[in-house]
Amino acid sequence: MDVGVDTHKKAHVLVAVGAQGQLLGTRTVANTPEGWVTALQWAREQQQQQQVRWGVENTGSLGKGFAQFLLAQGEAEVREVVPHRTAQYRRRGRTQDKTDAADALAMARLLGAEGASLPLVQIDDASTELRRLSDHRDNLVADRTRLINQHHAQMLQRDPRYEERSGPLTQAAGVRYCQEFDPSHAHALVPTRLLIVRQLATRITALTTEIAELTALMGQRVVALGTPLLQLRGVGPVVAARLVGELGGTLRVHSAAALAALAGIAPVAVASGSRHGHRVNFGGNRQRNRAIHIIALTQRRCEPLAQAYYAKKRAEGKTARAAMRCLKRRLVDVLYRLWQPRPEASPQPVAAIAA
């Protein structure tokens, strides 16, 4: 039996479909822990000695609580359904109605036709916490950058050459200079501007402290997991936390090519008539892509083998960006091999680049 779940903030709509595609029932439950219990009980009543497959939309947001509840209750097959696939199957129906029940029915039909190919929802683990910490740290860094820009604009109005004495605002000395800044000439608006400058400096200092604490915590979590990613030059606690958070402590892809495609690093084949070629992949998970890009930048600067590989691609006539994409794709192979369980001696990941 296949159950499609159309998720919303206040309520979820469930539609159950039998093995032969027949409609078994429809139910609306509240998006609360009590409603989740009701939904599971209802599905088991409709089960008819069949294994239940769940298709849940928005498992990373509105449907996350329900999907994690199902996994915690022992449901073995909870699949993630993306909205555009729901829309495709809804348009195949006899009517063009756009209702919650129609969406849930489309998910159930999709499960019956392509269930094995849909991604399984994974229960939250240590990698989930690392992803949350990484997202929170990125938000704090973005907030600090915004405040630094505001601070810089305020200081330019008071002293256009202040950076010659203070240094950049990204350093503690620069922020401290602005906190203690006291112009020599008096003006009616000076107290107001000084208040703004000092409050911004205080907030920047607080954010910097919070970011440092988060970075240290992420480093502790990564070391506790024992991930081999830290063996690779260019992978520090922040990058390792992002990669483990996005991909999980145990890699769930079947090949390095699949990992490259998921990260938007593998090129996209294009062909029309007698013309064949590839273009840059602008899709994929951009957080994974960014993490691997940081590794590639570090290796190009510090790792002789990566420098030789990059120089080789440039000598072949590739542009700087194209050579960088080749290096990133090569590093995906290295990362994939690092992730594989190896009972024998520790691998030597960097040397693999020259292979």
Image: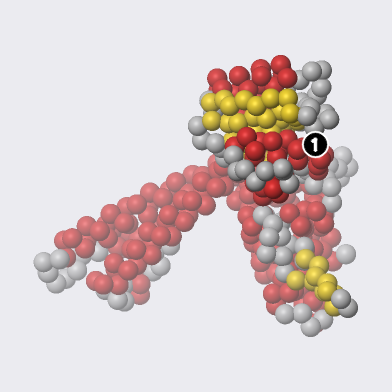
Rendering coords of residue 11 (x, y %) = 54, 30
Q: Is residue 299 left or right of residue 215?
A: right
Rendering coords of residue 321 (x, y %) = 69, 74
Residue at 58% from the left image edge and 27% from the top image edge: 28
Residue topped by disc 1:
112
Is 229 or 141 nearer to us in this picture?
141
Q: Based on the displayed image, in which of its 4 quarters is residue 282 positioned? A: bottom right
Residue 224 visible in the picture: no
Callout 1: few (<14), some (14-19), or many (20+) C-alpha neighbours within 10 Å? many
309 shown above or below 285:
below
Q: How is the image coloured?
A: secondary structure
Residue type at mark 1 is Gly
Rendering coords of residue 87 (x, y %) = 67, 47
Residue at 30% from the left image edge and 62% from the top image edge: 178
Is 242 or 104 nearer to us in this picture?
104
Q: Based on the displayed image, in which of its 4 quarters is residue 68 positioned? A: top right
34 shown above or below 120:
above
Query: In which quadrant will I find the N terminus?
Result: top right
88 shown above or below 191:
above
Q: Which SS class for mark 1?
A: helix
Is 331 or 109 nearer to us in this picture?
109
36 shown above or below 108:
above
Residue at 55% from the left image edge and 20% from the top image edge: 34
Q: Is residue 208 left or right of residue 233?
A: left
Is 309 or 23 nearer to us in this picture?
23
Q: Based on the displayed image, in which of its 4 quarters is residue 188 positioned? A: bottom left
Rendering coords of residue 237 (x, y %) = 62, 49
Residue at 55% from the left image edge and 47% from the top image edge: 135
Residue 104 visible in the picture: yes
Q: Is residue 85 left or right of residue 309?
A: left
Query: In which quadrant will I find the C terminus?
Result: bottom right
